[in-house]
Amino acid sequence: MSVPATMSWPSLRVSDWTPTRDTLHMWTQIVGKIRMAHAPLINHWWQVTFYVSPRGLTTSTIPYRNGAFEIEFDFVGHRLEVRSSDGGARSLPLRPMPVAEFYARVMDMLGRLGIEAPIRPHPNEVEPAIPFAEDHDHASYDGEAVTLFWRQLLQANRVIGEFRSHFVGKVSPVHFFWGAMDLACTRFSGRPAPPHPGGAPNCGDWVMVEGYSRELSSCGFWPGGGEEGAFYSYAYPEPDGFADQPAGPEGAYFSSEFQQFLLPYEVARAAPDPDRAVAEFLRTTYEAAADRGHWDRSALEDNPFRWQETPAS
């Protein structure tokens, strides 16, 4: 049974859940740093990300000694679940609590499972960067709002995943970066990029140099940039004339503040066909980057339905 777009694309005003959003951001940074401590480096920091799951956000499998573990934010049952390959499991209810308490309880859970977690206990890409153990400012958790946010991520993950399938060049998974708290997917031209200048708050410039070491077109969704969040698209390095290219659908625009194209989530949600509206935004802004940047599009793009069109043998 199909679900009406007005239900599957939920409304969530940023102003209605900002304290919860900011607390959740810090919680995801703690868990993300735990993954980063144990996963080997993959280009552009792909080893640190989360993935949208049927119940929330998961680290996926994290290697640990001769086994593995996983941490999942369950935004349906509102619990943090830790599961290890040796059969161990621990669970933490998600409820209003300071970041300092969440941090202490997560570390205690890991310790009880015999998992060491040597992380740098400070957040990145935010200002001020309050050490996790001292952060009593962020302490909100509105479970209903968090579930709505996860449902926004479900829709964004699905449509961006379809968009990703049309590219046969180097392309990232659709994954959730806890640094900026956004769902992202990045396509690459195959050429190197000039060193990124950095400048992200409380984040070493070398982090951005690694992340942007190759010419790219990146898109995604994050809970900012519009009344209900926004889809975004940018290029690095930005080719001449990129910002002046037309972007669809109506309501999409280039933000001089953020230096990227934005499609407010509420515009997509209210469209007759939200999937088509977001797909048009992703396609037109990628084409702006690829065409202005002189990418070899014939070598990088393909039809993801090509096998369906092959006659049965």
Image: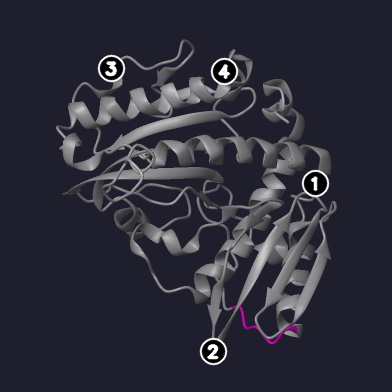
Task: Tell me the crowding category of disc 4: few under 14, some 14 to 19, or many 20 or more residues within 10 angstroms, Cα based.
Answer: few
Q: As shown in the figure, which amino acid type bears the numbered disc 2?
A: Asn
Nearest to the observer: residue 106 or residue 9? 9
Secondary structure of residue under mark 3:
loop
Q: How many marks?
A: 4
**Mark sitting earlier along the chain (4/3):** 3
- Asked if residue 116 lies in the magenta stretch, the reply is yes
**Mark sitting earlier along the chain (4/2):** 2
Which residue is most to the front?
313
Name the mark nearer the viewer: 1 or 2. Answer: 2
Task: Tell me the crowding category of disc 1: few under 14, some 14 to 19, or many 20 or more residues within 10 angstroms, Cα based.
Answer: some
Name the mark nearer the viewer: 4 or 3. Answer: 4
Q: Horizontal placement of 111 versus 292: left or right?
A: right
Is residue 285 something that shows in the picture? Answer: yes
**Mark sitting earlier along the chain (1/3):** 1
Q: Are marks 1 and 2 in contact (CB under 8 Å)?
A: no
Marker disc for residue 245: 3
Marker disc for residue 140: 1
Nearest to the observer: residue 95 or residue 53? 53
Q: CA distance from mark 4 to mark 1?
A: 34 Å
> The N terminus appears in which quarter of the rendering?
top right
Q: Are marks 1 and 3 in contact (CB under 8 Å)?
A: no
> Which residue lies under the disc numbered 4?
273
Is residue 142 something that shows in the picture? Answer: no
Residue 22 sits in which quadrant?
top right
